[in-house]
Image (tube, helix red, strand yellow):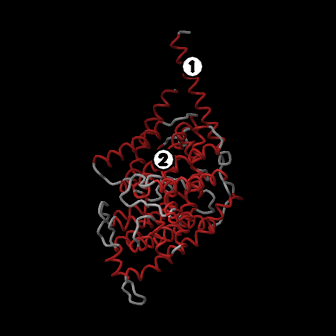
Amino acid sequence: MQPHLILVAHFDYQTMTTQSSISKRLDSLYEFDREPVTKNKLQGIGNFLGMYAGEHVAGTEFVIGMLFVAHGVSVRDMFLGGVIGNILAICSWAFLTAPIAVKVRLSLYWQLKKICGSMLVFIYNIVNALMFCFLAGAMVAVAATAVGIPFGIQMPALHDLLPNSIGWVLTVLGVGAVITVMAILGFDALARFAKVAAPWMFLIFVAAAIAVLPKLGVAPGSGNFWEVARESIWTGVAKEGQSQFSIWHVIFFSWLANAAMHLGMSDLTILRYARKWQYGFSSAVGMFLGHYVAWIASGILYAAAHSDAPGVVAYEAIGLAGAICVVIAGWTTANPTLYRAGMALQVATGWSRWKVTLLAGAITTTAAMFPALVMKLLDFVALYGLVLIPMGAVILADYYFIPRMGLQSYYAEKKKIDFNMAAAGTWFLMLALALFMNFYFKIELYFLPAPVWIISLGLYLLFSKLYQKETKSQTA
């Protein structure tokens, strides 16, 4: 055999070996998620109500409500836009994600593997893991703003992008270390604790907001809340250095803050346990208690505070209980997020779970040192959804439209390929287009996920038609 043919053969062998290794790692990681959920494992609606309530009363709510005030949202835009946006989010869960989840009953991973192949899902998992790390980092930073209060550390302000003091760095290191250790140990008690803590945290949000209303000028029984809210809280005027938000910002952010979960189909993994697709409406508990009410309460707290740090804001309102609430809210959100990030990174490294979780914890803690992650949380959450939702569009298109076009769904599984070019082309091209629209045309991130998701549907169908036709002609 000629030398160049030997090199090619050796390269092909190495490529196949690598792909096989990745497949084995993926299969090992998701060992219990390979088959559809059986009827005896289905759960009642109470579990979903509790899950959505617990997941969406979190440390992020302290920050998001504050940032709406800082960006000059008016009182009308906040209350009306929040209702419209959260209803759209509920409908996305109920009408898009839940029906596929209960009919197929596969996790997000196995859906994507059947469609896209192991190599592409490998890339998806790496991206997803990094996003998880940054999100967990924001929650570590939120918790650190409360932990640092007794030590008198200099808290980051709204305009801070870099670490502003040694005290801040040390506090973040301490909080990150504790959360990483907890994630490594994988305490089942943490999940139970989060469910128990969620109602208490919600009550703290509401009680704290009510407690500071007199400080803002809302007299008991005076009926002047709307006047005070318009003049002192949601004034319609952005703070210095912050962009001006309109009702459209509130609507699109409320709708797409969890775009990765509904339009991106991540909650297929959760809702596949539902007895009926209508359980998707249980997301309403999270959207209107955990988001709508909590964001409003957070905005009220911020208007009455003298700090941009969530921990200090809560502490000024109701003292120690408020600071503890911020710590717990950040902790109960960061821990499972970090755990999931570690599991996803295991695919890339082949290390044991504790090692990859330690790596994820190091990335998370490093990211948390930079206040920009918290102070720009609205942008990051929008970016997170934007990066992942094209794959959600691929899943929906593959389920509903691909068979109707006379094409094969689950193409990677049926053709035994590791990299579906149609899905990869859709994902990469849409991300490039979205970034181009953001940088060149200055279209804000909040408005991009919806059109990106819609275009991804059409693009995947077009690419699949071309790709499956070409593959068929090559094998004929």
The vertical placement of 92 against 302, above or below, is: above
Residue picked out by circle 2: 391
Secondary structure category for the residue under label 2: helix
* Residue under pointer 1: 10
Label tally:
2
From the viewer's perspective, tell me whether residue 411 is left or right of residue 456.
Answer: right
Left or right position of 183 against 216: right
Q: Amino acid at mark 2?
A: Met
Q: Amino acid at mark 1?
A: His
Measuring from the top left, give residue 355's x and y in whole percent: 63, 43
Quarter in which the N terminus is drawn:
top right
Q: Residue at x 32, y 49 (%)?
A: 438
Q: Tag 1 or tag 2, which sits nearer the N-term?
A: 1
Q: Secondary structure at mark 1?
A: helix
Q: Which mark is residue 185?
A: none
Residue 134, percent across and down?
A: 49, 51
Nearest to the observer: residue 271 or residue 203: 203
Q: Is residue 457 visible?
A: yes
Q: Position of residue 142 (x, y in %)?
A: 49, 61
Q: Residue at x 32, y 64 (%)?
A: 245
Measured in 3D between alpha carbons, the distance from the residue under mark 2 to the one under mark 1, in whole angstroms, is 33 Å
Q: Residue 303's x, y, as percent?
A: 38, 73
Tell me the mark number nearer the camera, choosing from 2 and 1: 1
**Identity of the residue drawn at 39% across and 50% down:** 452
In the rendered image of this protein, does residue 77 appear above or below residue 161?
A: below
On the rendered structure, is 160 left or right of 194? left
Residue 413, picture quadrant:
top right
